[in-house]
């Protein structure tokens, strides 16, 4: 057998021992039901391979008739299939039962002990209390060690938890009873933690009869160190000294445990040491911020505590001889030392704080850029935190600048003056640009592999830095009492520069830089909206940028985005230019539609046409709403829109289908104008056009017999019937209703006779609508049974038709089955 070999694993093809549940090499389950199915498939593959080999050995003579197919060989008796794996059982595994029971039992024992001490403690004498405490503790601890020695590890782990818990209760009870004198709660907690630390370490290090060491006491030892640290904080009253002592004890215990091979104990002692280190560092930093003067910082000890905290951050990596831990511990240490040295500037003015933060962060950024690869991670933490601080200062300056713009916009007097005024900046505006550039430099250096990338990547980062510099320069300008146009001009220059640089970049960076430029340009447009002159300038720049991206960008998505921005930019330019020229809002819609129509005709692209159409509709609605004569304005704008749609259909062959929409819009404009003039007989205007459209459709059908009547005849038929139908719905008792109904009947009959769908559907729909409208006034006068009877008759007809069609299907199926 080539494939179905029961002695080999079907996955890794290694030797498979007899009667094993899984492959020893790859772990594939060979007794699973899927394994049985796989073995059958492989055996079938062996049979097919044998037949194919036999067919390939038979020579075929030229011109000889093909030999009959060979009889397949008798299949080889299959080897015994592997036994199916037993069905997976659900529920709790047997190994989990003792864990649950013993854990629950240990918890009950601890609760019982606490309850006993709380209720019966005061009724026992000194001797009784001592006997009870020692008996409970010794009994649980001895039983735990005995059970562990006998191999019942789960029971031993559970009872040792009870024993150590009893030990903690012993210390707490003795302290509350005054056996050790008058002790505070912190001192009692300290004593309990020390007891747990010592006892847990001793029991965890104990090995009985070659059994594995117990894990629970090693974990409880770390918990004891944490409890002792919390108690010492209250007892000693010096959090810095207490934290440093806890760190020293934790590190020393961790080292000793590692050397003794107690990995769990080492981890449990390292955790509270880390907590004490973090808490001590935060306390030292808080005290340094409260008293930031140099004398108080270094004489009172908080500065030295920060230095000790920094040194402790490097200890784990040095002890473990782990390069990554040394590097990142050194980074944290560098951050702490930097904070300790920079804290005294907190009392200085905000400008000085910003300058110091800039200089320090710049120094660490240079270190991040030029240090050797081995030392470079040390500069990461101080550089990142410094970048966050600088970014916060930039955001504060930006928010104040936006607030100044809001003050100008909200006041008519200030808006007319067009100058920034109001709240003075809280930070130094001149530091905004260099601070933002340092943040960009940190981001560039932290990107993976940036230092080794190609020149194009650095050009892209330089472009991003230029955009950020331009935006922050505008923020800086807005922080002083200057014209609003100055800040907007900086933004527009930045947007144009970003678009220019983006066109020279690779496709990957082109999209990102161009997107930044478009966001900046959009921001300039929004900020300039309260002033028509600024809006004209901003929208003109936006239009040029969008056109450049649409025509010159190498990324298809960027070309599409640029094209979609052409219409709104042009619309805003025309609207603001007409506003600057004091043209009334009523007449702004026509030049807007004309400009957008020329754009759509010049660039027949969907990404250009659709936004232009939306912008034109919005501008037209605004103009129509502002017009004193709404109907005349609506007719005018519909005429212009229909003309433009028809023009693009005539000019571009790919837009021929738009001719129907253009004609419909022109017809609608005609109806609106006729309604405004008081015309009540639309047939004189619609029937000639409908006859022309119908004749054109008939000529098209004659030239192309395969053409659809729905495409050729529907526009003319709808134009002939729909306007009259609207008047009939308003006045059903008229000669128009009779003639329209007669025409609908003739169209329906003609469509049925000629088998044309368009006249049949249009005639039936119009005729049914006319009949229903004529029936409407009398429907309420008919008895209820009439409508019930009509409904029942309709249901019976539908049911009979359905059953007849079903019978026909069954008859056809029977005939098909009797065919040979």
Image (cartoon, grey):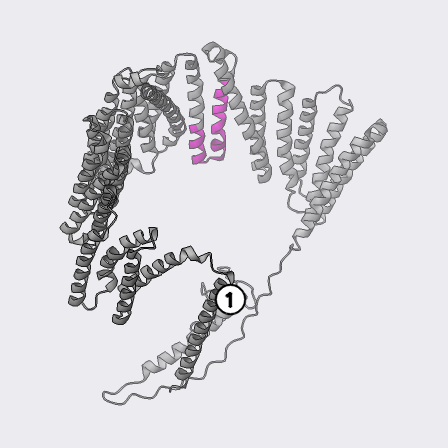
Task: Tell me the SS state at disc 1.
Answer: helix
Q: Which residue is mark 1?
A: 34
The residues colored magenta run 304-331
* Residue plotted at (31% across, 33% down): 444
Image quadrant in which you'd find residue 50: bottom left
* Residue plotted at (40% across, 80% down): 812
Q: Is residue 28 left or right of residue 71?
A: right
Image quarter of the C terminus: bottom left
Residue closest to the eye, 810 or 487 = 810
* Residue plotted at (29% across, 85% down): 59
Residue 563 in view (yes/no): no
- What is the x, y in percent for residue 649? 17, 51
- What is the x, y in percent for residue 665? 23, 47
Q: Is residue 214 above or below residue 306?
A: below
- What is the x, y in percent for residue 613? 24, 43
- What is the x, y in percent for residue 718? 26, 57
Residue closest to the eye, 210 or 794 = 794
């Amino acid at each position: 057998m080539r494939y179905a070999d029961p002695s080999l694993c079907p996955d890794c093809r290694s030797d498979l021992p007899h009667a094993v549940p899984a492959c020893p090499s790859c772990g594939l389950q060979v007794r699973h039901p899927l394994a049985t199915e796989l073995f059958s498939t492989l055996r079938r593959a062996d049979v097919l391979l044998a037949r194919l080999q036999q067919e390939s050995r038979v020579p075929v003579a030229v011109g000889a008739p093909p030999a009959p197919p060979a009889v397949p060989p008798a299949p080889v008796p299959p080897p015994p299939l592997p036994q199916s794996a037993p069905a997976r059982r659900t529920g709790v595994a047997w190994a989990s039962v003792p864990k649950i029971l013993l854990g629950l039992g240990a918890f009950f024992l601890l609760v019982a002990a606490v309850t006993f001490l709380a209720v019966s403690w005061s009724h026992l004498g000194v001797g009784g209390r001592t006997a009870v405490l020692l008996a409970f503790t010794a009994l649980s601890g001895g039983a735990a060690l005995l059970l562990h020695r006998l191999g019942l590890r789960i029971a031993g782990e559970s009872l040792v938890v009870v024993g150590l818990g009893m030990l903690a209760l012993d210390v707490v009870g003795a302290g509350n009873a005054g056996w050790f004198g008058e002790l505070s709660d912190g001192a009692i907690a300290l004593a309990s933690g020390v007891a747990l630390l010592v006892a847990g370490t001793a029991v965890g290090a104990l090995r009985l009869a070659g059994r594995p060491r117990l894990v629970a006491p090693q974990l409880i030892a770390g918990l004891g160190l944490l409890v002792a640290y919390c108690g010492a904080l209250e007892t000693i009253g010096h959090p810095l000294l207490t934290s440093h002592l806890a760190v020293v004890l934790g590190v020393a215990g961790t080292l000793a445990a590692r050397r003794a091979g107690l990995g769990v104990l080492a981890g449990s002692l390292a955790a509270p040491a880390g907590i004490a280190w973090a808490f001590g560092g935060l306390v030292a930093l808080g005290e340094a911020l409260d008293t930031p003067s140099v004398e108080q910082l270094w004489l009172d000890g908080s500065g030295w505590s920060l230095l000790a905290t920094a040194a402790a951050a490097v200890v784990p990596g040095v002890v473990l001889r782990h390069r990554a831990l040394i590097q990142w511990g050194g980074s944290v240490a560098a951050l702490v030392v930097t904070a300790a040295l920079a804290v005294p500037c907190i009392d200085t003015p905000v400008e000085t704080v910003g300058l110091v933060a800039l200089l320090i962060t710049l120094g660490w950024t240079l270190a991040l850029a030029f240090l050797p690869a081995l030392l470079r991670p040390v500069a990461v933490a101080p550089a990142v935190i410094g970048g966050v601080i600088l970014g916060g200062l930039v955001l504060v300056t930006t928010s104040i600048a936006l607030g100044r713009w809001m003050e100008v916009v909200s006041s008519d007097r200030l808006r007319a003056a067009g100058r920034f005024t109001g709240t003075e900046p809280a930070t130094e505006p001149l530091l905004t640009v260099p601070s933002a550039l340092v943040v960009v430099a940190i981001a560039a250096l932290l990107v993976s592999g940036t230092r080794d990338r190609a020149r194009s990547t650095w050009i892209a980062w330089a472009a991003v830095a230029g955009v950020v510099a331009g935006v922050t320069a505008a923020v800086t300008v807005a922080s002083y009492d200057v014209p609003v146009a100055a800040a907007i001009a900086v933004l527009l220059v930045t947007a144009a520069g970003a678009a220019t640089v983006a066109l020279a970049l690779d496709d990957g960076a082109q999209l990102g830089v161009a997107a930044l430029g478009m966001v900046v340009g959009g921001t300039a447009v929004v900020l300039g909206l309260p002033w028509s002159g600024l809006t004209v300038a901003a929208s003109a720049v936006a239009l040029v940028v969008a056109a450049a991206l649409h025509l010159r960008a190498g990324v298809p998505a960027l070309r599409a985005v640029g094209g979609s921005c052409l219409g709104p930019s042009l619309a805003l330019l025309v609207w603001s230019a007409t506003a600057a020229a004091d043209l009334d809002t009523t007449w702004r819609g026509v030049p807007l539609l004309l400009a957008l129509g020329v754009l759509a005709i010049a660039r027949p692209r969907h990404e250009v046409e659709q936004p232009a159409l939306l912008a034109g509709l919005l501008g037209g609605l605004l103009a129509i709403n502002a017009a004193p004569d709404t109907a005349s304005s609506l007719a005018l704008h519909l005429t212009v829109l229909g003309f433009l749609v028809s023009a693009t259909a005539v000019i571009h062959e790919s837009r021929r289908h738009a001719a129907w929409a253009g004609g419909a819009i022109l017809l609608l404009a005609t109806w609106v104008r006729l309604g405004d003039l008081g015309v009540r007989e639309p047939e004189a205007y619609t029937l000639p056009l409908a006859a022309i459209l119908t004749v054109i459709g008939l000529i098209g059908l004659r030239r192309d017999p395969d053409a659809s009547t729905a495409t050729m005849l529907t526009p003319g038929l709808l134009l002939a019937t729909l306007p009259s139908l609207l008047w009939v719905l308003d006045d059903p008792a008229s000669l128009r209703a009779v003639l329209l109904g007669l025409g609908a009947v003739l169209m329906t009959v003609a469509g049925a006779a000629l088998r044309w769908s368009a006249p049949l559907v249009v005639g039936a729909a119009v005729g049914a609508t006319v009949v229903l409208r004529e029936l409407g006034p009398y429907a309420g006068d008919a008895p209820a049974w009439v409508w019930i009877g009509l409904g029942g008759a309709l249901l019976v007809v539908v049911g009979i038709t359905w059953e007849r069609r079903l019978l026909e299907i069954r008859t056809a199926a029977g005939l098909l089955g009797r065919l040979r």
